Image (cartoon, coloured by chain):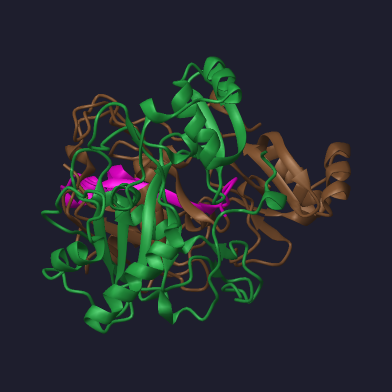
Chain colours: A green, B brown
Amino acid sequence: MTPRKLEVIALDDFPFISPGDDLASIILERSHTAGLHDGDILVIAQKIVSKAENRYRNLNDINPSTEAIELAAETEKDPSLVELILQESVEIVRHRPSVIIARHRLGYVLANAGIDASNVGRTREHVLLLPEDPNKTCQELLQVFSDSCDARLGVIINDSLGRAWRRGTASIALGSAGFPALLDLRENPDLDQRPLKVSMVGLADELASAASLVQGQGNEGRPVAIIKGFDPFNFEVSGTELTRPEDEDLFR
Amino acid sequence: MTPRKLEVIALDDFPFISPGDDLASIILERSHTAGLHDGDILVIAQKIVSKAENRYRNLNDINPSTEAIELAAETEKDPSLVELILQESVEIVRHRPSVIIARHRLGYVLANAGIDASNVGRTREHVLLLPEDPNKTCQELLQVFSDSCDARLGVIINDSLGRAWRRGTASIALGSAGFPALLDLRENPDLDQRPLKVSMVGLADELASAASLVQGQGNEGRPVAIIKGFDPFNFEVSGTELTRPEDEDLFR
């Protein structure tokens, strides 16, 4: 059921998103040219979801705790930013000067708990937290998209993360809805009818990376992509969350 | 320079690859339908490169060392397989029953040092090592492809790897040639003319993941994909290796 051909298309003329904007309507409006059909997957950059959800925080409004002040001194970071990192995290996994790697309250392990100070579109004192609940937002957007166009669609909110052993970022799915995020191929035989080595595929993450190639990372202003041709609904497997549970984590 | 649209196309009717096969000719032959044009990137699954390079090893021919026998007992693995893992690695990063995560001699951190026992197409005693030098093979293939079709192309050898904090595999570039594997955007401003948060993009890895979506992981027999529309040659940035140097690794 793996497709032979995919198209990855960025939506054009996407406006700057502000708190309270109706993201679903804006995306639907810009999707008319490409069209939305069965199997299409909409991939939406984390940043515009956070902006629509008004996840802005003004560093001047934060009172850093003693723990934040100490960690800020060790990492040479702004104590107010570190306070927000601590509030958004359940664990500081590693730190050193200029680096804080945290386990976010939703399980992602990433730099600065995903708090972003670039392209946030406010003053230099404003930063942007990750969306409140990316899976829930994906489900809500999926509902609006599906009602509007009568097609079986998928939705991903993606973000670019650093990796433990690879240089450069790769995009992953903070949340997804409408299709299996994780493909469990453990029951499938290989070409020689033996169990497969690669048996669980991070499908939503690979789709997120494919979308990232047309979204860009910088000042392109192209936060939404449509992936056409995949139709992951054909996979007869169940999806689940992609963050690795702590008891499976060998690298704490 | 980020493209607005990409196509990812798997090559059809790909034959089973055996040691000594002329991979370049076989790929060129199958590329006629899709055509090869400026900016196209050929993504080739690790497994067929290893097969063409005869990276098969027969476990019955291996004499496990004392170290291998001890690690095999701790991990409940075949001592001969563990001996090969040790030979292919510079460091065992983590191990526990049924899991060995190694730093491969070429820097990749991955399970079993990338040694594969599925879809290898020989007896159950045969396993398949990673290619000898994926970057060099990419450069050699690129040379043949470029000579044949007079286009500026890119080549990637990809493989699906587990991740420290994400469930499921994602495909990465074991090697690449012809374009910048890593995009250094550190000098680029964001929409607000501030430095970018995401400043180094693992471009070759994101392309590898996009290709993986049409290659599949199991018995599809579709090991080669062409990504059209990207033209990463337009990026005026330098490429470099993607494996993170040990002195940057916080998770040893």
Highlighted range, magenta: B141-166
Residue B182 visible, this angle: no
> How many numbered marks, from 0 up?
0
Q: Quadrant of the C terminus of chain A?
A: top right
Residue at (22, 75) in percent of width and height: A36
Decide which of A110, A196 is in the foreground and name it: A110
Residue A98 x, y percent position in the rendering: 47, 21
Q: Residue furthest bottom?
A: A150
Task: Describe residue B5's horizontal placement relative to residue B139 as left or right.
Answer: left
Question: Is residue B162 found inside the magenta-colored segment of the image?
Answer: yes
Residue B93 visible, this angle: yes
Residue at (34, 61) in percent of width and height: B225
Residue A55 x, y percent position in the rendering: 36, 45
Q: Quadrant of the N terminus of chain A?
A: bottom left
Decide which of B174, A160 is in the foreground and name it: A160
Q: Is residue A234 above or below residue B89?
A: below
| The quarter of the displayed image where residue A145 is located | bottom left
Residue B43 x, y percent position in the rendering: 36, 54
Residue B188 x, y percent position in the rendering: 22, 28
| The quarter of the displayed image where residue A151 is located | bottom left
| The quarter of the displayed image where residue A38 is located | bottom left
Residue at (42, 32) in percent of width and height: B241
Q: Is residue B158 above or below residue B252?
A: below
Question: Is residue B161 found inside the magenta-colored segment of the image?
Answer: yes
Task: Describe residue B66's horizontal placement relative to residue B119 as left or right.
Answer: right
Decide which of B121, A237 is in the foreground and name it: A237
